[in-house]
Image: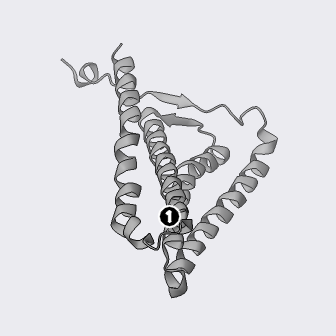
């Protein structure tokens, strides 16, 4: 059996057609999305840096805000660079693995942001309550565990099923 006959793998790709109908708008859309992404990234990173540098901001609220900024930075970084690449390049395809990876990371950061917002709501509730036990209700270890461990488990479930469905569809 020849080697060419044995290896007949093909890579599944998706063609992104969103902006191909308006080629004259692609440069202006690239500049608009690049500006929005730059403002978002610089804003989130400067918030993280200013919270880390200033000792007056080492409170639970700013601790949560810095983590929320980090999650927002990661979420915008999973989507926007690929969009910017596809606006500039002629090749508008994305591989199945790249698509699933991008979707998986987006789901992780959306779920992480949801958990972070829930923890921030609980922190505000406890801090506004008449009880002076704020540090006993929301210790830092619980916040870190709820933010970075729980969202991983919850976000893996739907993505795993979707990935398995894609694998099954490839075999059919």
Tell me, yes or no, if residue 113 can be seen here. Answer: yes
Residue occupying the point 38% across, 30% down: 163
To which quarter of the image does residue 57 belong?
bottom right
Per the image, the residue denoted by label 1 is 126
x, y percentage for residue 29?
Answer: 75, 48
x, y percentage for residue 148?
Answer: 38, 56
Residue extending furthest toward the top = 172
Nearest to the observer: residue 90 or residue 146: 146
Relative to residue 22, is residue 88 drawn left or right? left
Residue extending furthest toward the left = 1
x, y percentage for residue 47?
Answer: 59, 73
Relative to residue 165, is residue 21 drawn left or right? right
Q: Quadrant of the image for the N terminus?
A: top left
**Colouring rule applied to residues:** one colour
Residue occupying the point 53% across, 65% down: 129
Above or below, 76 relative to 134: above
Nearest to the observer: residue 22 or residue 106: 106
Task: Using a 10 Å C-alpha cutoff, classify the residue at mark 1 as few (fewer than 14 neighbours), some (14 to 19) or many (20 or more).
Answer: some
Above or below, 80 relative to 11: below
Tell me, yes or no, if residue 138 can be seen here. Answer: no
x, y percentage for residue 172?
Answer: 36, 12
Residue occupying the point 41% across, 32% down: 158
Residue occupying the point 40% across, 24% down: 166
Nearest to the observer: residue 16 or residue 41: 41
Relative to residue 83, is residue 55 drawn left or right? left
Helix, strand or loop under label 1: helix
Report how many numbered discs are placed on residues in the image.
1
Residue extending furthest toward the front = 130
Residue extending furthest toward the right = 24
């Amino acid at each position: 059996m020849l080697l060419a006959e044995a290896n007949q793998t093909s890579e599944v790709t998706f063609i992104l057609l969103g902006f191909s109908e308006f080629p004259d708008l692609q440069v202006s859309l690239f500049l608009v999305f690049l500006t929005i992404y730059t403002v978002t990234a610089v804003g989130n990173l400067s918030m993280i840096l200013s919270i880390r540098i200033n000792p007056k901001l080492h409170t639970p609220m700013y601790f949560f805000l810095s983590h929320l900024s980090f999650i927002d930075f990661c979420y915008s970084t999973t989507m926007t660079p690929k969009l910017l690449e596809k606006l500039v390049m002629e090749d508008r395809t994305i591989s199945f693995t790249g698509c699933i990876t991008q979707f998986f990371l987006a789901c992780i950061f959306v779920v992480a942001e949801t958990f972070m917002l829930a923890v921030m709501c609980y922190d505000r509730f406890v801090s506004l309550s008449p009880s002076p036990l704020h540090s006993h209700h929301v210790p830092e270890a619980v916040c870190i565990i709820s933010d970075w461990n729980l969202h991983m488990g919850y976000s893996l479930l739907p993505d795993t099923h979707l990935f398995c469905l894609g694998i099954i569809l490839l075999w059919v």
